[in-house]
């Protein structure tokens, strides 16, 4: 038994010695390397107490989206602006247009598309599953029924297999998916063929970079700043108490003669009474109530002075605005809770139009139509999508525009009167220039 124990100890020592040797070799390599060219990423992460973006998972992005209101706004607000008004299908094919409009109403298509938009920005991709009849793992060649539409994020949808045949036009594309969903109180995991699934990613690739990766830490910082500001205000209200003790005060004595100051086992305390007093004062402060008795001493409040976090918070929001390309006022608003300037509104509209034209239309709307045509649900037809006016002009802008048009009308009437030597009414000018004074209340004003 002793020999066996000795061998075991020797093996353990060898392992420890080997480990220390490896560590020593690593230190020597580090010291002999060119430290002037080391990656500063580790320093940044250490100084700012940030998570390493390279180690973040889809679960991390889903969690911060669910529980961090700043991260949720980064995902939700652009999608809400993009789908603020339903898109218009413009086509001469009235039958196909009627079918799409009916589907939009009965299946809440645009609401589902907006959710898919958000899901695609949380992770690397999202999917929209189309409820065609038949076994879910089999391809759909022809269908005249679309019973339902559901969208899932990457935590619910995984790619099981890819097309590996090089001669196939879909080489490298997903072939089958595994969808995990909650039906009532039961979790179901079902395989779906790609013909039943619309694959949605931000840039049209199979997997896109998660939108929150580069601003994950910034979103957390925004909440830290808000929390620190609230905590500093609390600390200012729940001030600290200090004790000024007289020389002759029994607070400087030990508490061994005071049984009530002992521990739970009735052992007398050997600590100075002043220390016991400070602990009891802190306990009373934490509770929000309590009685503190001071003999031969005086309590003095030490007030905290919180700093204003507005400037730091503004910098953080500015970083988020740079990422999203939306104006800062979209995230904060003005005192009236709305965008304060026409310039901000125009910037918001421009970014939203770009998002609609470069993402929503090609990767969601067109992909949906193309799939319905591919399964013979629709006959091929020419069409285009157009989103409605994003933001109506304000009442002040409408009033100013009408004022300018009235002044222009008056100047033209005066010019005609002077040139022709006769009175020309506004009605006659309008007949001559019917399009000059037509005002449409849209953002082009």
Image (cartoon, rainbow, N blue to C red):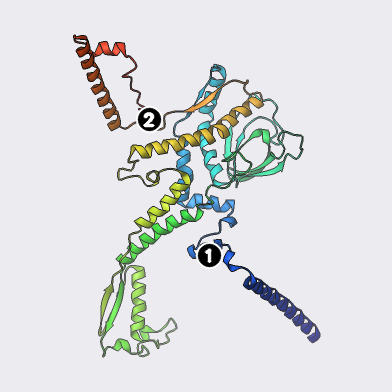
Secondary structure under tag 2 reads loop
> 47 left or right of 20?
left
Residue at 71% x, 36% y: name it.
137
Residue at 26% x, 28% y: name it.
399
Report x, y in % for residue 236: 31, 66
Q: Which residue is mark 1?
A: 43
Can you see residue 108?
no
Q: Residues within 10 Å of mark 2 (few under 14, many from 20)?
A: some
Q: Nearer the viewer, residue 378 or 162?
A: 162
- Give the number of marks: 2
Q: For residue 4, which quarter of the picture?
A: bottom right
Q: Which residue is mark 2?
A: 443
Q: State the CA–CA distance, disc 2 to disc 1.
A: 48 Å
Q: Residues within 10 Å of mark 1 (few under 14, many from 20)?
A: few
Report x, y in % for residue 377: 63, 24
> 102 left or right of 173?
left
Of callouts 2 and 1, the N-terminal one: 1
Report x, y in % for residue 33: 63, 69
**Residue, far front:** 419
Residue at 29% x, 88% y: name it.
250
| Of the two numbered discs 2 and 1 in the rendering, the one whose residue sits closer to the viewer | 1
Q: Which mark is residue 105?
A: none
Q: For residue 84, which quarter of the picture?
A: top left
Q: Nearer the viewer, residue 261 or 48?
A: 48
Q: Is residue 221 above or below residue 136?
A: below
> 257 left or right of 191?
left
Residue at 50% x, 34% y: name it.
356
Q: Quadrant of the N terminus?
A: bottom right
Secondary structure under tag 1 reads helix
Report x, y in % for residue 30: 63, 71
> 422 left or right of 18?
left
């Amino acid at each position: 038994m002793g020999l066996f124990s000795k061998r075991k100890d020797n093996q353990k020592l060898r392992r420890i010695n080997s480990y220390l040797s490896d560590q020593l070799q690593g230190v020597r390599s580090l010291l002999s390397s060119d430290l002037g060219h080391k990656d500063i990423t580790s320093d940044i992460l250490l100084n700012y107490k940030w998570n390493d973006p390279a180690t973040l998972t889809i679960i991390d992005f889903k969690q911060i989206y669910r529980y961090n209101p700043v991260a949720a706004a980064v995902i939700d607000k652009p999608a809400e602006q993009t789908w603020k008004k339903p898109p218009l299908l413009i086509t001469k094919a009235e039958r196909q247009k009627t079918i799409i409009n009916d589907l939009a109403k009965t299946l809440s298509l645009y609401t589902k598309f907006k959710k898919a938009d958000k899901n695609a920005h949380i992770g690397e991709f999202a999917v929209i599953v189309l409820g065609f009849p038949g076994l879910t793992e089999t391809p759909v060649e022809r269908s005249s029924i679309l019973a339902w539409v559901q969208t899932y994020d990457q935590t619910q949808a995984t790619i099981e297999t890819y097309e590996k045949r090089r001669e196939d036009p879909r080489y490298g594309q997903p072939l089958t998916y595994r969808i995990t969903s909650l039906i009532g109180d039961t979790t179901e995991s079902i395989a779906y063929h790609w013909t039943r699934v619309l694959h949605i990613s931000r840039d049209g690739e199979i997997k896109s970079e998660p939108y929150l990766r580069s601003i994950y830490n910034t979103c957390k910082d925004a909440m830290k700043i808000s929390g620190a500001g609230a905590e500093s205000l609390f600390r200012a209200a729940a001030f600290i108490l200090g004790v000024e003790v007289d020389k002759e005060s029994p607070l400087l004595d030990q508490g061994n003669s005071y049984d009530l100051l002992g521990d739970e086992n009735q052992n007398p305390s050997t600590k100075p009474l002043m220390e016991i007093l400070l602990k009891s004062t802190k306990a009373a402060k934490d509770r929000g109530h309590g009685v503190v008795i001071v003999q031969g001493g005086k309590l003095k409040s030490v007030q905290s002075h919180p700093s204003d976090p507005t400037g730091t918070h503004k910098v953080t929001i500015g970083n988020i605005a740079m990422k999203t390309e939306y104006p800062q006022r979209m995230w904060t608003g003005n005192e009236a809770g709305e965008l304060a300037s026409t310039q901000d509104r125009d910037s918001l509209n421009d970014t939203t139009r770009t998002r609609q034209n470069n993402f929503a239309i090609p990767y969601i709307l067109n992909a949906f139509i193309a799939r319905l045509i591919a399964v013979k649900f629709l006959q091929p037809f020419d069409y285009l999508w157009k989103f409605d006016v994003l933001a109506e002009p304000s009442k002040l802008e409408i009033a100013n525009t009408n004022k300018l048009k009235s002044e222009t009308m008056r100047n033209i009437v005066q010019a005609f009167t002077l040139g022709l030597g006769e009175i020309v009414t506004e009605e006659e000018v309008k007949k001559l220039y019917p399009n000059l004074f037509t005002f449409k209340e849209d953002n082009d004003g």
